[in-house]
Amino acid sequence: MALDTEKNSYTVIFSIIMVVVVGAILAGLASGLKPMVKANERFEKQQNILYALGVNNNEGANDVEFISTDNVEEEFKKYIKKQYVFQGGELKENDEAYLIDIKKEETKAKKGDYKRRLPIFIGEKDGKEVYIVPVRGKGLWDAIWGFVALDKSMTIQGVYFDHKGETPGLGAEIKQRYFMDDFTGEKFLDGGVFKGISVAKGNNDPKNLIKDDQEIDALAGATITGDGLAVMLSKDIKMYMPYFKTLK
Amino acid sequence: MGLLSKKDSKLIMDPLADNNPITIQVLGICSALAITAQLKPSIVMAISVMFVMGVGNVVISLMRNIIPSKIRIIVQLIVVATLVIIVDQVLKAFAYTLSKELSVFIGLIITNCIIMGRFEAFALANGTWRSFLDGIGNALGYGVILIIVGFFRELLGSGTLFGFKVLGDPVEKTGLYAIGYENNGFMVLPPMALIVVGIIIWVQRSRNKDLIED
């Protein structure tokens, strides 16, 4: 019996069967792989936080090398002593503060009088207490984000930046070591007053040896990404000022 | 080739050179521009396209007698989209860092004209084995160009290959940089991909005069 594939009823039945079959395949695959994808995302956050703290496999490498995913959880427990959530002047301990979605908090805070939850991770490296906070902002094409490790006086101990869709070779260079390393030692406070850090073009300090000028040498050809990065640092770190004041 | 008949091996060999999907048919240019700034994503993209095209051609070929012709383009799109989502999910689960590097570009495989073109032109009219070979052949032809373009763009644009500094260190001024060489920042911008593809087309046509149209 020849199949009449031209009939309307056949087309409708064919479409329905196809949608059901494809839906079942994809739903099965997605739910089967979900635990692995979730774990990957968790490991990535832990790796990024540890990277900002200066715990990584960078020794002898040119590129950004993270703690390997196999032992990132142990290392995270070892170096990150406490995790807090700072909300409306109150400080609460929260062991899963690193999973807080900064983007959602930002949108929620824009609507109404919701006080943003601000995660803080207290790490310890070489006997020194370091405070790591997340930041998030806009680059040229899409979102940029990262983690900044600060000491009590709001001096940068290390940073990690990442982006969603900046141009390779230009804005995407914010996640290169040579750029991120420049931030170490820069100060957010100038005589006790909060001052952001600018990403400056035509800087007369290209090797970034002067650490108290609140300036980082810009990336060539990435003006908007660089400016976005500076804005992100100022606006997000400033929110933590009340917390850092309590430390003194 | 003992395994493949002469006709079958033509299906693999033709798209590699004389009927290359990028340089001769001028299809799939969009993704060639987007992801070839570095070599590694170019290779992963080539492998992903090979999976989508090989499996997709087989699926379409198997269904070719039951697909209603009225909605065949939609059916083809669903098959590509499904396979691309599978690739994306598998990369996210097993090669997370790589999947982040490729980000939107894996999704862009759906818009690759070569795939829909092969479904429409070949798989709908041919048997499973031949469709499979045709898919793999075309994906290889696409992949070869991607890898060539990725190689030159990463080498000349960033001085690296697979992220390793092969031309020396631009900051420390070692290797080629010591004698005044500088990375060509223009190479990492999308327009240069088009120019490199253009140069490949030029070289290919000047070597094989049969390809030149009057």
Image (cartoon, grey):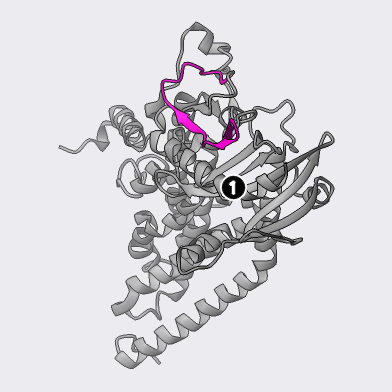
At mark 1, the secondary structure is helix
Give the residues drawn in magenta, as a range: A188-208
**For this rendering, which residue is in front, B67 or B169?**
B169
> Percent x, y for residue B191?
32, 35
Dot 1, crowdedness within 10 Å: few (<14), some or many (≥20)? some
> Percent x, y for residue A169?
46, 33
Query: Which image quarter holds the C terminus of chain B?
Result: top left
Residue occupying the point 51% across, 42% down: A234
Q: Please give left or right for residue A84 compared with residue B30 in the image.
A: right
**Magenta-colored stretch includes residue A197:** yes
Residue labelled with disc 1: B98
**Magenta-colored stretch includes residue A105:** no
Quadrant housing residue B89 = bottom right
Q: Establish if B177 lies above or below B89.
A: above
**For this rendering, which residue is in front, A162 or A218?**
A218
Residue type beneath disc 1: Leu
Q: Please give left or right for residue A231 compared with residue B125 in the image.
A: right
* Residue A40 seen from this side: yes
**For this rendering, which residue is in front, B80 or A133?**
A133
Which chain is mark 1 on?
B
> Percent x, y for residue A78?
84, 47
Quadrant housing residue A98 = bottom right
- Give the main secondary structure of the magenta stretch: loop
**For this rendering, which residue is in front, B27 or B152?**
B152
